[in-house]
């Protein structure tokens, strides 16, 4: 047992003989990237890539300043501040091997909840060239059915009336871009790293919608001066557990209050469209392409939708983690059938990717017993995920006459999940969703109206008008409500 050392800058030398630590001079780096939404994924993905670039190729102008805009960001702000913004990544391999590494790419953090001024000033600073986002699928403030900006959101209403004290991402971005325009500075690139198809286009359309309502001249300037590259991001990053924190302290004697874990696989495909320069991320494996859409569609329809298939069905069956689902042969066969018979036929050609190999790799990654990604995390915010990951495949297969039974069972199971909130063993489910109340109320009406859940047009659009889908869905609903043995219905479909 090594003596315990608290993770911070002055203690790095003591830790260097235990695990890899940053060897570049962090004090000489300046902020070139401001990242909004510093969660686990950002820390294992974009910040990880940035650290590699700084470690191998210097890149002193591309330090990251994290930004939190929600009360919930207070904890990560305080932990990272205490640790001089250092943290540990634990890469967990399927064979049980764990590779720890201390990451040093984040060099500052601003919290904009009580005082927005420092955040706006940081965004408007001439050194800031990229503003990247992981604000979750639900953070883009659009109606999932129509794709239109939601001006009814009370925080958006506040930001339109009080531009000097914003609450939302759009209020902060327009406030900073207005200052840059006044100072004759170039616009920064807005780079979404969220799991949304055409994420850059969505960020652009939503920001312009907001800016047009707030200041039409500014909106015109943003349209001309700001780039919004689409990107596809991928690395499975489970929620950090106390066991991860304890492992790091007991095995390496490192006291890190919030390390982060991930799988070995990492991928980032980005359109090479930047307003004001960019890091040479291609040196550390990032793929720059003219059009990212086929890649992101592949990932969203296979990996993200695959996660929802396992998560929602697995939750009702009683599986606690994704790898537990993958230890159940019935779930593995069902997942692969969904991928092969419903998702793949609705994909575009993806240059340089062998889809069969990609699907094989997903099966292997989901089964990683060392990751233990919780089903509750995968199911969280399903109201923001399912309309983007799963419904487009159903809609396209409805149009083309393809199979829809595998995905439709997931929608029926989601209704039961939202209504009953228990698994087949009568154990309560942890439901985390901004729309959990609305989902529950709609699902609750299912016993008198079998289509009540899918009549939520903001989520399901006009799917209720398709007779083939509604007949199949209603039949599945009746079976699940009669007996919640989801595995039996999976086997029936197979």
Image (cartoon, rainbow, N blue to C red):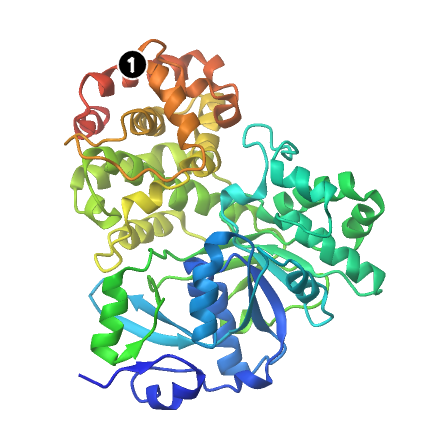
Left of 219 or right of it: where is 31? Answer: left
Q: Could you say which quadrant of the image residue 412 lies in?
A: top left
Look at the picture and state if 352 lies above or below 12. above
Q: Position of residue 415 (x, y in %)?
A: 34, 25
**Residue sitting at 37 percent across and 51 percent down?**
358
Residue 267 seen in this snapshot: no
Look at the picture and state if 422 lies above or below 187. above
Q: How many marks?
A: 1
Q: Helix, strand, or loop for circle 1?
A: helix
Q: Where is residue 280 in the image (x, y as percent from the top left)?
A: 59, 72
Look at the picture and state if 194 lies above or below 419. below
**Residue sitting at 52 percent across and 65 percent down?**
286
Q: Which of 484 and 357 is in front in this view?
A: 484
**Residue sitting at 35 percent across and 25 percent down?**
408
Which residue, as the protein is rendered here, is positioned at the far top? 448
Quarter of the image where the N terminus is located: bottom left
Quarter of the image where the C terminus is located: top left
Q: Residues within 10 Å of mark 1 (few under 14, many from 20)?
A: few
Q: Where is residue 74 in the image (x, y as percent from the top left)?
A: 47, 59
Which residue, as the protein is rendered here, is positioned at the far left? 425
Q: Could you say which quadrant of the image residue 208 lies in?
A: top right
Q: Which of 444 and 144 is in front in this view?
A: 444
Q: Where is residue 296 in the image (x, y as percent from the top left)?
A: 51, 47
Residue holding disc 1? 475
């Amino acid at each position: 047992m090594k003596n315990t050392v608290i993770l911070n800058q002055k203690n790095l030398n003591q830790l260097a003989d235990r695990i890899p630590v940053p060897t570049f001079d962090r004090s000489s780096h300046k902020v070139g990237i401001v990242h909004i939404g510093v969660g686990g994924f950002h820390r294992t993905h974009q910040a990880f890539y940035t650290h590699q670039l700084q470690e191998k190729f210097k890149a002193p102008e591309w330090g990251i300043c994290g930004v939190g805009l929600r009360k919930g960001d207070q904890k990560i702000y305080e932990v990272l501040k205490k640790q001089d913004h250092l943290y540990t990544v634990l890469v967990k391999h399927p064979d049980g091997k764990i590779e720890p590494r201390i990451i040093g790419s984040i060099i500052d953090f601003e919290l904009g909840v009580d005082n927005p001024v420092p955040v706006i000033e940081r965004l408007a600073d001439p050194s800031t060239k990229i503003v990247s986002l992981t604000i979750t699928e639900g953070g883009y403030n659009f109606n999932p059915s129509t794709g239109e900006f939601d001006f009814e959101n009370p925080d958006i209403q506040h930001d339109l009336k009080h531009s000097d004290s914003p609450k939302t991402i759009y209020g902060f971005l327009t406030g900073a871009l207005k200052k840059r325009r006044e100072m004759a500075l170039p616009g920064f690139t807005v780079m979404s790293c969220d799991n949304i198809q055409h994420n850059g286009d969505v960020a652009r359309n939503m920001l312009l919608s907001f800016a047009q309502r707030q200041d039409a001249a500014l909106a015109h300037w943003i349209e001309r001066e700001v780039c919004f590259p689409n990107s596809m991001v991928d690395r499975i990053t489970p929620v950090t557990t106390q066991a991860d924190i304890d492992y790091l302290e007991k095995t390496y004697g490192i006291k890190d209050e919030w390390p982060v874990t991930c799988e070995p696989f990492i991928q980032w495909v980005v359109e090479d469209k930047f307003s004001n320069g960019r890091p040479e991320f291609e040196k550390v494996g990032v793929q720059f392409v003219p059009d990212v859409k086929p890649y992101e569609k592949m990932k969203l329809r296979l990996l993200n939708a695959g996660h929802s298939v396992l998560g929602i069905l697995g939750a009702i069956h009683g599986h606690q983690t994704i790898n537990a689902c993958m230890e159940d042969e019935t779930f593995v066969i069902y997942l692969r059938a969904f991928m092969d018979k419903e998702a793949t036929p609705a994909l575009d050609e993806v240059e340089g990717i062998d889809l069969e190999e990609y699907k094989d790799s997903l099966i292997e990654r989901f089964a990683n017993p060392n990751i233990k990604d919780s089903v509750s995390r995968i199911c969280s915010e399903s109201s923001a995920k399912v309309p983007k990951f799963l419904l487009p495949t159903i809609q396209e297969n409805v149009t083309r006459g393809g199979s829809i039974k595998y995905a439709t069972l997931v929608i029926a199971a989601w209704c039961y999940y939202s209504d009953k909130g228990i698994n087949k063993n009568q154990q309560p489910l942890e439901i985390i969703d901004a729309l959990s109340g609305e989902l529950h109320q709609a699902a609750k009406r299912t016993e008198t109206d079998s289509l009540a859940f899918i009549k939520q047009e903001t989520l399901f659009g006009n799917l209720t008008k398709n007779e083939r889908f509604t007949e199949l869905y209603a039949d599945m609903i009746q079976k699940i409500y009669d007996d919640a043995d989801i595995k039996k219905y999976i086997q029936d479909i197979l």
